[in-house]
Image: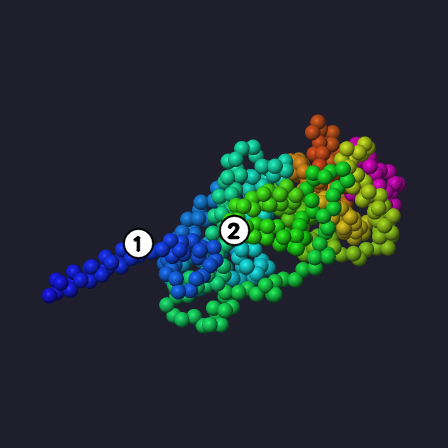
Amino acid sequence: MTIKCQSFRSARQEAKLLHERERPPCLQSFSALRLIGFNLSGTPRKAVDRLAADLLLVASSLLVSQNALQGKVAQSFLKVLQHLRSGRSEEVLQSYGLFYRELLSAGYCSWQDCLLDEVLAGRGNEAAKQVAAEACLPPGRAVAGALACDLDALQKLSVAESTLVSWVQEQVPSELPTAWISAASNLHPAERRPFDDSASPACTSLPGAATMIEAPPTPAQKQEWREQIAGQWQWSAGLDALVAYWARHGCGLTAAHSTMRFADGSLEALTAQGAKLAGKDLWDLASSEGASSALQHAGPDLLEHFMRPAATQGPRHVQLASVWEEAEVSPLLWQTLVEGLAPSGKRIVLLPTSELQDVHRLKAALSQYPRMAFVVVTEATADRDGGLGKLAALHEEPQGWPENVQVCAHWRLPVGAPPKVRRLPGYRIFDW
């Protein structure tokens, strides 16, 4: 009798397995639906650890867009998947909490928005660099095919927060509070960090340079670019929009910022928070009355000079000769250039006096962006510092500054000294 009972149970198990194999295709494809954010209640679900393992495999399969998953938010998302696959309950909850916090800190209301921003940024993406430099993809279909595969893979990784929370619930034996589930599933779009779109620089074309990179997109413009990809049933169908974004705005650091600083041999972002020049806040308008009036007098001509087409005859660079010893004169100069040039797409790069010895490395770095216009602004320096000599030596080389770069060299004359100005070759002098 015992043997018969065991045979009966075995037969039932075999019947169950056969039933699973003969499920309708709509149920067999359920796992794929969940991977793109659908949550169909009452439908059999694949084990959470298997789903997480599958997504980690997808993340490992990227061909050219690996850097899209290198940011803090993306890394915290991958850590959630790792703990869902093999971690303990406490580690699952802690990793999701970190992921949630990183999303809030970055100012996003969804993981999908964050992921799409990383895709648009194209940091470390050789295809993006090619498009930014030449306004087209490399010849042949290999790169386009790799990008399309990556877009579809990243779409699978754009799991909805509600789906991710449901996976967390299944991996935690204790029942989670309803309030926690509600809060963790929704970052509330209404609480996204506010921005004033009218304060963002407008995209206007440089005279005679329609093919040049434009200014960084405003938050509203970036949202439109995200929707052009996210609105496709398959993200690979948005490849043309992605290439168009790179062609118009560039990629990486220079695509995201109009103001940068050259430090330790490389470019870095320079924002209004904590930016210093000559020991003063770059965005601090306080200055002496004399320096302010002098800049107001020279400012329009200075901006007009930098807005001229590159092919215009005459000196390309500018040399400022100043007798003002107040350090505030440099922030005034900086703000004048940023407010007057950034909306046109020009990138303003601060070259500190301490970095003049590496000016060759700056030249090499800027030459990698032939479709982007730069204005390099030096800190106010006395000729005894040797700064003007370094700039002059660079100009006299067979290959001086790249065609897409203009220099604004600020030379401070000693107070009370005769107004004797050392002229640099290829520079136009402004006295102020």
Residue at (84% x, 43% y) in the render: 301
Q: Nearer the viewer, residue 324 or 346?
A: 346
| Residue 20 in picture, x, y percent from top left | 31, 56
- Magenta part mainly helix, strand or loop? loop
Q: Tell me the element at label 1.
A: helix
In which quadrant is the N terminus drawn? bottom left
Whether the magenta-drawn stretch holds residue 152 is answered as no
Q: Nearer the viewer, residue 260 or 37?
A: 37
| Residue 97 in picture, x, y percent from top left | 49, 63
Question: Does residue 258 sit above or below 392 in this rendering?
Answer: below
| Residue 353 in picture, x, y percent from top left | 71, 43
Q: Nearer the viewer, residue 203 or 311?
A: 203
Q: Nearer the viewer, residue 149 or 288?
A: 149
Residue position for label 2: 233
Q: Quadrant of residue 10?
A: bottom left
Residue at (40% x, 54% y) in the render: 29
Most distant residue in the left direction = 1
In which quadrant is the C terminus drawn? top right
214 sits to left or right of 9: right
Please say whether residue 377 is visible from this viewpoint: no
The amino acid marked with disc number 2 is Trp
Most distant residue in the top direction = 398
Q: CA distance from mark 1 to mark 2?
A: 28 Å
Report crowding for label 2: few under 14, some 14 to 19, many 20 or more residues within 10 A (C-alpha): few
Residue position for label 1: 21
Residue at (61% x, 65% y) in the render: 190
179 sits to left or right of 400: left
Q: Which residues are magenta?
A: 410-432
Residue at (24% x, 58% y) in the render: 15
The amino acid marked with disc number 1 is Arg
